[in-house]
Amino acid sequence: MDASLMRQSALLIPAYQPDDRLPPYVEALKSAGVGKIIVVDDGSGEKFQPLFRSIPQDEVTHVISYTPNGGKGHAMREGMRYLLDHCPEQRFIITADSDGQHTVRDVLRMIESLSENHEGLLLGSRDFSQENVPFKSRNGNRITSAVFKLLYGVWVSDTQTGLRGFERSLLPLMIGVKGERYEYEMNVLIECAQKHIPMRALPIETVYENNNEGSHFRAFRDSARIYGVILDGFFRFISSSVISFLVDYLLYLLLNNLFKRFCPGLEHQFRFLFISVLSRIGLATVIARICSGVVNYLLNQKMVFHYHGSGSRSFLRYLCVFILNMLLSAGLTSTLHLWLGWSDNISKIPVDLLLFFLSACHIAFDLFLIVCIEKLDFSNCNSFYHNITCLMHLLHL
């Protein structure tokens, strides 16, 4: 690789209570020509200071130490701030773990790939089908990737990889991402997905030594943090949708009863009873849905504001489903009212619940496919926020 490109590279290694593999790993990277190596001692304690002192402080390597332990996300931001403030020549930024999972060869391949295409975020992607991968890592990552695809519309084959690369211009964005511990890395993926920053994968060697016992990842606590981050936008979306559903239904009740009382002509302007009832219910449904849709949009701007549409094609699909949903709601409500004698005010509830159930089944089927057949090309699938916006968003459930 071109030596000038190597001099423009920087490797950031957050480390908490590392083992003896870290100093030789740093030395091997230095010998390979990496321009700058930043090791962040994330409050490892006095016991580990001899190990960190064994890493030479020179023009290539630098160790940042502080107390107390702040978490991986905190360590990443400290290292990135140092790179931003003190290393203006470093153009290609690579992050790697200190537990021996990322080989020197893969780090060099990441630098080379970034030099050829520096757009967006480069992710070192492991092969989880190998026999040496622990059960919790294999299945946990598969489920997380599937959920991330449904929620944010981007397939990331290795959401937990610590080997990542990006161009210097993204440093301010990375420093601004929230999260003190392992959830920081998931927040980075979400931020990139929401801002339409490209994410691409580079296959890397899959290394798990001693069943990954060197990792400080706590399965329950850290997984809860990560999934809390992933699902945060979903829960806020549900909250805004419930409020909008109440607006939709209450406004529908008001309009439907007002039309029956003050606009009796709506009942008799058509010759057939079914069409006349459909006219009244349909008009009430349309007005209520448009008003509640505006409320839903404004709430999402304040409470969610995560998903941004992908142009006229997405809008046309949204509009078609919006119209279809209103027609189904009005038609089925009228059918229950006429055929079963139900109140037109009450029959709207099971109709909208049925439509919600059908949309939920569609989402569940998508999740099943992604989990079971993770290598399918889902590039044409819309994100959860688009699919649900077309279905749940309109139902306000």
Image (cartoon, rainbow, N blue to C red):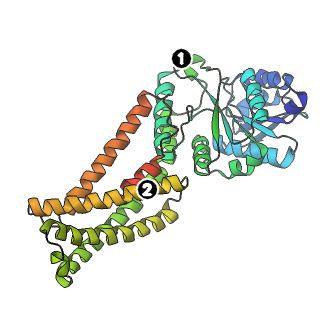
Residue, far front: 271
Mark 1–mark 2 distance (CA, rounded to whole Å)? 41 Å
Can you see residue 396? Answer: no
Residue 364, numbered label: none
- The one nearer the camera, 340 or 205, is 340
Task: State the image coordinates of residue 302 (x, y, percent, origin top left).
Answer: 51, 65
Task: State the image coordinates of residue 363 (x, y, percent, origin top left).
Answer: 37, 43
Q: Which image quadrant: the C terminus?
A: bottom left
- Looking at the image, residue 377 sits to the left or right of residue 126; the answer is left
- Looking at the image, residue 337 sits to the left or right of residue 221; the answer is left
* Residue labelled with disc 1: 130
Task: State the image coordinates of residue 236 (x, y, percent, origin top left).
Answer: 45, 57
Secondary element at tag 1? loop
- Looking at the image, residue 386 sits to the left or right of residue 291; the answer is right
Secondary element at tag 2? helix
Q: Residues within 10 Å of mark 1 (few under 14, many from 20)?
A: few
In the picture, residue 91 is in which quadrant? top right
- The one nearer the camera, 275 or 386, is 275
Task: Please tell me which residue is depicted at 14% across the width and 59% down the height of the picture.
Answer: 336
Q: As shown in the figure, which amino acid type bears the numbered disc 1?
A: Gln
- Count of numbered tags: 2
Task: Please tell me which residue is depicted at 44% across the width and 53% down the height of the picture.
Answer: 317
Q: Which of marks 1 and 2 is nearer the N terminus?
A: 1
Q: As shown in the figure, which amino acid type bears the numbered disc 2?
A: Tyr
* Residue labelled with disc 2: 318
Q: Which image quadrant: the N terminus?
A: top right
